[in-house]
Image: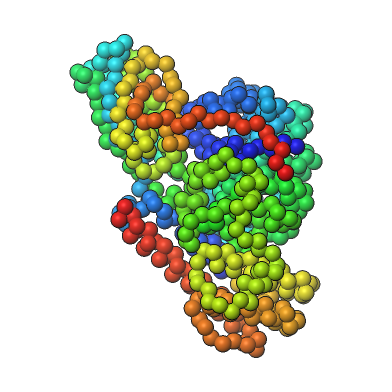
Amino acid sequence: MPVLTPKLASNMANDVYDLVKSDSFDFGFEQFKHTYGSIANLDKSNVIKSKTGAVAFIKSRTAFGLCFIGKGSYQGHAFIILRGTKFLADWLTNLNVGVSRSVNGQSVHDGFNQAFKTMQPQLAPFVSGLISNNIHSIHCIGHSLGGALATLCAEHIQLATKRKPYLYTFGAPRVGLRDFADTLSVNLWPENIYRVYHRTDIVPCIPFWPFIHAPTKMSAQYDYYQPSPGDFPSGEYHSMAKYVSTVGGLSWSALRSRRAEMTNNKNIEQWILHQGSVNFSVTNLNWLDKAINYVLAKTISHLGGALTVVSGSTFTLMDRLSYILAKGIDISESLSGLVLGLIVKIMKMLGLNKALTKADMTRGFIRSVFERLNQRIQAYCRRVLDSALVDGRSS
Amino acid sequence: MSFKFFSQLIMLVLLFISFGAYAMSINDIGKQCLFSSFSGAITLNGKPVNGAKIKRVAYRSHTKGDKTDYATTNEQGEFAMPAVWDRNIVGKFLPMEFAAAQEVFVYFEGQEYQIWNGVKRQKEENTESNGEELNIQCELTSEFIFKSVNGNKFKTRCTWAAKADAPFVIDLPVEDN
């Protein structure tokens, strides 16, 4: 089935920000109609009258969305473009963020989930109209927090309509845990998930483990990694304008080809076990994230049901992390080597070149290493602040 | 289940994105230009309007509310208004896209004319005019035009020197898998 080009998807994700409060969204809507009126039924009167889902505004405290049906060369297409509000951003930074069940019963970020659930009643007429309007292609689009909402929206639409929507996200954070990402990958198909992210955009890296992006199947094949300069997280490379510029007029296959390195299991293991020095950079933080996920997944697959002991409420994520990794030491020679390698790697990133053996890998020691990593990240952030201020003064 | 450690990580990494090219000094953190300095001349049927009241509304980007100010034209129909700034620590520290709505109205001889409606998408000053001062010429009887400058979109009766963005051409759907 035909999909949107990267240029059209990214511009729509960008232009939905123009629908800001000046006079009941009139101006932004008029602008949107000016740009997309030739391919979309954007009759403002349908917004109020709509019972069949021709056009819909979705407004809640945490989210905003614009939904409409295509016409002309986009006959049979439906568009759902979402963006988050500052209240949703508050959720993302909530220190007590939890996991709750998505509409399909999967484990997702509770803040995103609550935000999406507030949208659902307003979305319902449009979604039910998708079937009666003979829609064959449904496009869910969003940037940043809007990308997280678009992801949950795609899951909902697939469940409600039994059709496979296309999901286009730019700089979106991680939405759910492994079960969610796996199920979404199966239900949407990996080739229908267009997740574009810059290397130095930190938002797609969060929330950290155990949150994970979809697609998990064929993830190397359908990866829209985009290089960005420097080795430092960049606010500029999170902005939607930068994504529009990066995408330009390129095709999806051209964007896929920009993937820098294939992070298959083999080279993740190589990164963990490589003896050389390793600095504290955004590149290595990304590798570290993959390495933690890889070693944990491998350990968990061996532990199986024994893990229920750490799922209680008294265990923090750091407790779970250190418990699982410490268990990995006892499982097999190869796995214990990976756990040791991972901890040594973190220590090297921290500038600690202490000789370690497997006997040192106690739960308490592993936890202390992760605590030091946490402290180092704090210090790293302070340097980013100082650096930004110095750069600013000189500009 | 407590997410203490990784939640802290989330908070910390969010800080990474907070410090971009916008920062100019420690006092400028979170500072946003909602509407650049705005000057020009207004005519009605080709003649300068003298004593017309100008109302400018600059809407905040991440929070509710606006900043409204006024000016009056002189005998040549000219006016000048300073830039409108806001400070928003929320937008500085959270991954929020900047989008500030703008409106300008002219009141003359008992009539209201809306001359400017737009959305400013960059926090720096003068982005409405590609870095130059925003100096407009506005004929109140003119039809509205749509103009996009550096990604900032406007519907206006005014003209100004900034080069308009190339018109957006909509691609056809593609088979790309």
Judge from the rendering whether residue A249 lies leftward or rightward of residue B126; answer left or right. Answer: right
User: Which color scheme does this rendered protein use?
Assistant: rainbow
Image coords of residue A191 (percent x, y): 72, 47
**Residue at point 47% right, 34% down?**
A21
On screen, residue A130 above or below A377: above
Who is closer to the viewer here, A221 or A368? A221
Image coords of residue A196 (percent x, y): 60, 49
**Residue at point 38% right, 58% down?**
A388
Quadrant of the drawing holding the N terminus of chain A = top right
Who is closer to the viewer here, A193 or A302? A193
Who is closer to the viewer here, B22 or B165? B165
On screen, residue A339 above or below A188: below
Res A192 → quadrant: top right
Q: Farthest residue toward the top?
A: B45
Judge from the rendering whether residue A161 lies leftward or rightward of residue A90; answer left or right. Answer: right
Image coords of residue A114 (percent x, y): 63, 49
Is residue A250 something that shows in the picture?
yes
**Residue at point 73% right, 55% down?**
A218
On screen, residue A190 above or below A98: above
Is residue A342 something that shows in the picture?
no
